[in-house]
Amino acid sequence: MQLSLDTVALLFIVAMVAGCVDTIAGGGGLIVLPTLLMAGIPPAAALATNKLQGSGGTLVASLYFLRQQIVRFSEIRLTILMTFVGAVVGVWLVLQINSTALQAIIPFLLISMGSYFALSPQLGITDQKQRIAHKPFSGLIAPWLGFYDGFFGPGTGMFMALSLVSLRGYNLTKATAHTKLLNCTSNVSSLLYFLAFGEVYWRVGLIMLAGQVIGSSVGARIVIAKGATLIRPVVAMVCFLMASKLLLDTFG
């Protein structure tokens, strides 16, 4: 389909903003996807194109955090693998069953999570004692995080970050950095499926990917510079906004 120059420019700007927000707190997809639909792109193609540009953004942020040595790839290879496996299963299952019930539950989980971040001023300031070791986390928790992203998606970044803070004892900066690698993994696994079925709008997706690269690069630097003092309130705000949108979509 042909889009006007103004629409393409808007999609580029939206992707740039979403990339920055998503790197800091997650939830970028809920900014991009409605914009793609409003531009007249069919739902299946919008989902696929969103995964293309989102994968680019999370990859750029992941590479930045790896270069800064906040994340060491050798230490989380198993976590990444199990996240990928879970996401593949989620993408497959969403085609087999109706996810309406989950869509009704998630807003309330997001509200609870947003409240937790908002009312916990010391959350993620420093590393805490871990409640679960690396291998059990990778084997038991990571597949479910990947599965959720493949099956449903909204709030994945928040769920990943919260699990790393609460179970692995990471501070918020470290948790956010690790979340980008896990989120990139689940995004890529979903994207591979869409590529196999040819649903991606390449021109739009690549233009938005360029915007994501810029926004994600800025967001990654903000995460390191500001840390938990910025991440915690932004995550809480994004949780409430995402929950409101999902409730309107479900019950409005």
Image (spheres, grey):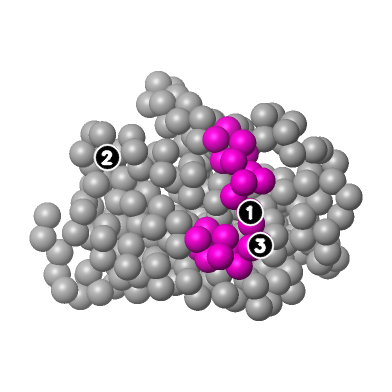
Between 14 and 243, which is closer to the camera in this rendering?
14
Label 3 vs label 2, nearer the camera: 3
Q: Quadrant of residue 105?
A: top right
- As drawn, the residue found furthest toward the front would be 74
Residue located 84% across and 46% down the image:
130
Residue identifier under label 2: 195
Q: Main secondary structure of the magenta part?
A: helix
Judge whether 224 appears above or below 53 on screen: below
Residue located 77% across and 55% down the image:
170
Query: Looking at numbered disc 3 in the image, what kind of residue is underneath it?
Result: Ile
Q: Which residues are magenta?
A: 61-82
Dot 3: element: loop
Residue identifier under label 3: 70
How far across and down, in percent of the image, does residue 233 sit? 70, 69
Residue 43 among magenta residues: no
Judge whether 65 appears above or below 219 on screen: above
Between 213 and 40, which is closer to the camera in this rendering?
213
Tell whether 45 sits left or right of 241.
left
Label 2 neighbour load within 10 Å: few <14, some 14-19, many 20+: few
Dot 2: element: helix
